[in-house]
Image (cartoon, rainbow, N blue to C red):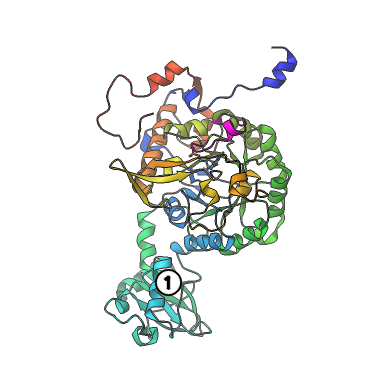
Amino acid sequence: MDASLDEKFGLLGLTFDDVLLLPGESDVVPSAAEPRSRVSRRVEVAVPLLSSAMDTVTESRMAIAMARQGGLGVLHRNLSAEEQATQVDLVKRSEAGMVTHPVTCGPEATLAEVDVLCRHYRISGVPVVDADATLLGIVTNRDLRFETDRSRLVRDVMTPLPLVTAPVGIAPDDAMALLARHKVEKLPLVDGAGRLRGLITVKDFVKREQYPLATKDDAGRLRVAAAVGIFDDAWKRAMLLVEAGVDVVVVDMAHGHSRAVLDMVARLKAEPAAASVDVVGGNVATRAAAQALVDAGVDGVKVGVGPGSICTTRVVAGVGVPQVTAIAEAAAACAPAGVPVVGDGGLQHSGDIAKALVAGADTVMLGSLLAGCEESPGELVFSNGKQYKSYRGMGSLGAQQTRTGTRSFSKDRYFQNDVSSTEQFVPEGVEGLVPYRGRLAAVAHQLVGGLRQSMFYCGAATVPQLKERGRFVRITAAGLKESHPHDVQMVLEAPNYSGR
Ligand code: XMP
């Protein structure tokens, strides 16, 4: 090819199905492989998995489940800023060494109102406080269970003072000993004036043992990320999320190589109120775009233009870069700057996780692989006797109509917020169904288990070693055919393989 054509056609684009990892000499057994990695400059995860910021994948329930498994959920933004901040709050309150701002009620609340609170926050009881936060008592399941009249007032039903309480700053072991000695499940923390300052619950101790890999902040609360855009209320939204305690703000646009995205990243990085929050920017698919984000001061770069299972960007716009090449190109700019890369979209099997990491990613973001989980938003759908959950692109027509039927907040991801009617909108995604997969814990176990096997085959004890030592072999269509089960009729479904 002459030089000008070479410049025009440039790269060969490869994706997951174009490559396999070469087996390497190995002393690593899968169970000893360490899949710990980084989402962004300051946020570590025990497993390198993120759930997509999509309204059929990540709301608070999925974000809680992801963090418990050692990954991270990115809350979608196809809802109002206030609703999204509430989701952050739900995650941050869900599990903590100490709940710093416990949900409370006043003595004049009705039992029906307490029911609503408990259901909303998935908790089993609340401390009762007066207007200046002085602890008056506690109302829990035990007080509520046999009450048939839900119009009764809390003050008539609660367990009043004196309660077992402790001072703020009590050591976890001492708190556990107090809970055990008094056979109670909640320990309100009070200051010298008797005002409620926090809460420790036995549930949190149990969860700490149950989820040893959980992704937590310095205060012992689960970590959560949330997506924002760049238009309209994006700044207000970001500040509400920061106020609610979000750990990572993801500036999430279909095309991250644009001045407005870079400005948003730079503005967030310069905002003192957001100093403790990491900023991930995207999406990009080229080295130059990743470099521009790095130059803007980003803490993590999200890569993927059109690889997603529900994406139609590559056919609607004819634009994109096959994902393995896109990750490698972005990593070429990010790695020297110490900025982690998120490989977003296009993963179909657990083996694709290690391929993404060897290409240069530090974590991967999953949509279709997680949309079928119990914890993803949406109801089960029955079709031909099988169970499914709905899954749709954020650029699909359906996402223009939110689940609750209110205004859509997702079209600006595709830079079409100036389009007022649905008929005028140019979709870049489709809507569909994915098989129901059960609990995230089981799904994540298979995904991480696959990654551990990859690390064993590649002789890599850690993710940095995998990235350094991993080598690809490029394969042909015949090689891909050989990779999948062939010449048999499958009679039993494996938990980690679904046919093509
Ligand atoms: P997978 O392959 O895991 O991909 O299902 C999830 C990722 O796809 C992106 N996404 C979209 N891309 N049109 C697009 O071009 C869409 O409607 C759309 N919705 C989501 C997103 O990056 C997600 O994490």
For residue 384, above or below residue 186: above
Camera-nearest residue between 410 and 24: 410
Residue located at (72% from left, 53% from top):
267
Judge by depth and name the residue closer to the eye, 220 or 395: 395
Residue at the spot of label 1:
117
The amino acid type, in three-letter code, at marker 1 is Leu
- Nearer the observer, 440 or 187: 440
Q: Quadrant of the C terminus?
A: top left
Whether residue 315 is in magenta: the answer is yes
Judge left or right: residue 129 versus residue 1: left
Percent x, y for residue 254?
61, 42
Residue 464 spot, x, y in % from top left = 52, 36
In the figure, is residue 434 to the left or right of 263? left
Q: Residue furthest left?
A: 491
Residue at the extreme front of the image, as rendered:
423
Quadrant in the rendering for residue 163: bottom left
Q: Is residue 159 above or below residue 433?
A: below
Q: Is residue 217 left or right of residue 124?
A: right
Residue 66, above or below 461? below
Q: Which residues are magenta?
A: 308-323
Q: Quadrant of the N terminus?
A: top right
Look at the picture and state if 123 lies above or below 459: below
Q: How many marks?
A: 1
Q: Residues within 10 Å of mark 1 (few under 14, many from 20)?
A: some
Q: Main secondary structure of the magenta part?
A: loop
Label 1: which secondary element:
helix
Point 68% across, 42% down: residue? 293
Percent coordinates x, y for residue 283 in the rendering: 61, 41
